[in-house]
Image (cartoon, rainbow, N blue to C red):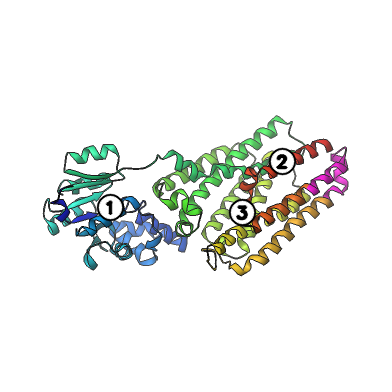
Amino acid sequence: MTQANQLTPLCIDLDGTLIHSDLLLETFLLLLKRNPLYLLLIPYWLLKGKATLKAEIAKRVTLNPAALPYNEAFLGWLKSQRELGRELWLCTASNYRLAHLVAGHLQVFQGAGGVLASTDNINLSGQIKAKQLVEKFGERGFDYCGNHRDDLSIWRVCQCAVVVNGSEKLKKETERLAEIGPVFPKTGDLLEPMLKALRLHQWAKNILIFVPLAAAHKLGDTASVHHAVVAFIAFGLCASSVYLLNDMLDLEVDRQHPRKCKRTFASGNLSLLIGFALIPILLLCTAFLAFSLPMMFWVVLGGYYTLTVAYSFGLKGVVLIDTITLAGLYTVRIIAGAMAIDVPLSFWLLLFSVFLFLSLALVKRYAELDAMQRQGKLKAVGRGYHVEDLPILHSMGTASGYLCVLVLALYINSPIVESLYRHPQVIWFLCVLLLYWISRVWLISHRGKMHDDPVVFAMKDKPSLVIGVLAIITVILAV
């Protein structure tokens, strides 16, 4: 960039350029989380124009500009330009209320007046933005930083174009319209962050669907195994759709978490638009697979989806209700497994599952709160827990875990076991294994070394895997 450019006002787009996100989508999610019924008003506002839609949403939400995923490399360059004495102007199609919040937080733009943004009636994008910039600075009287094809009309009338997060094709199109300044290319591809957003590793929880299959001694029944596999995939796709929704609704909370801030939507590595597109696709695939299974499986899967959406929208913030809901979501997988292969549910299995999964849900909350305490925070953001709750969570969690061991012991001593197993006394070893595993999980949690999700931890933890293998051998020996 020449010396003359250093004196030229520098105009910066916000969405996709200064931040790795889109404020309209971010604020829409904030509005949706505040009250899902606002969804009914969106079409009405949109009929009045995009500027009205942005304004109505901006009036009703509270945006935390410090939590936005800024393009740090680009922002560092902007600060260096500011130090050289250049005028920096934030020029965005976002509503002026939000634009001023961002400008006030960053403190790099031209005083209080260094913001050009959409009003309640005018959507400042494309040709309209180009016209307003020419009126203010004159044709070829400013440099412009953008990221989208919509910015081509602006680059056509600017002096120097700075392409940020743009494709190689966009860069070539821009070169034909204006002098090219610094280029800040996209980093990474879409596939990896997309797969991370789907949380395929969480599909490990769906192994619970096979528990009724094993408990009913139907592992050799081809039809039952086929139904269980289809149910496993359907549950995985359904769960992934909810993970996407959950992550998009929890953007601000996740950005303040030591590990969750690296999630694809929170970090800005994946566009929210892709998330909105993937959710219905996953649900359609789920419905297609579920169509081949018994009707009761549909009912259970529908209940699971409803409960998970309710959890994402509010239940996760209610003390204890959140952990009971999590325990229920684990147990629902076992119920779904029974419905998929059309076998009666075992009272013992359900009771065992409730206590075990309540203990693991409390482990999850304990680990999150413990991490917050180690950061010096007094409460978990977006939850209702305080650091002084750690001892009681520990007590409730260990008690629930040991109760599941008690249920297993009572089950082993029941008459039904003698009819299912030739050597039922061997199964007592399961109590020892489970007692050790639960105690170890809570000890690790107390030391602050627990992964946020204990199920995922168990899938990666060598001692846990050894215990799992020993448990399978024990059941085989008992048959």
Instruction: Indicate which disc, 2 or 1, sits on the residue closer to the N terminus.
Output: 1
**Residue marked by disc 2:** 466
- Could you say whether the residue bearing mark 1 is in a helix, strand or loop? helix
Measure the C-alpha gap from mark 1 to mark 3.
Answer: 38 Å
Instruction: Indicate which disc, 2 or 3, sits on the residue closer to the N terminus.
Output: 3
Instruction: Indicate which disc, 1 or 3, sits on the residue closer to the N terminus.
Output: 1
Asked if marks 2 and 3 touch (Cβ < 8 Å), the reply is no
User: Can I make out residue 35 in this image?
Assistant: no
Mark number for residue 392?
Answer: none
**Residue marked by disc 1:** 77
Q: Quadrant of residue 99?
A: bottom left
Name the main secondary structure of what is drawn in magenta: helix
**Residue shown at 19% from the left, 49% from the top:** 154
**Residue shown at 26% from the left, 49% from the top:** 146
Which amino acid type corresponds to the residue marked 1 in the rendered image?
Trp
Q: Position of residue 204 (x, y in %)?
A: 61, 42
The stretch of residues the image draws in magenta is 410-432
Q: Position of residue 5 (x, y in %)?
A: 15, 51
Which amino acid type corresponds to the residue marked 3 in the rendered image?
Lys
Q: Is residue 167 above or below residue 407?
A: above
**Residue shown at 65% from the left, 41% from the top:** 207
Q: Is residue 453 above or below residue 177?
A: below
Asked if marks 1 and 3 touch (Cβ < 8 Å), the reply is no
Which amino acid type corresponds to the residue marked 2 in the rendered image?
Val
- Could you say whether the residue bearing mark 3 is in a helix, strand or loop? loop
Camera-nearest label, 2 or 3? 3
Mark number for residue 449?
Answer: 3
Q: Is residue 215 left or right of residue 196?
A: right
Asked if marks 2 and 1 touch (Cβ < 8 Å), the reply is no
User: Can I make out residue 381 in this image?
Assistant: yes
Q: Nearer the viewer, residue 310 or 461?
A: 461
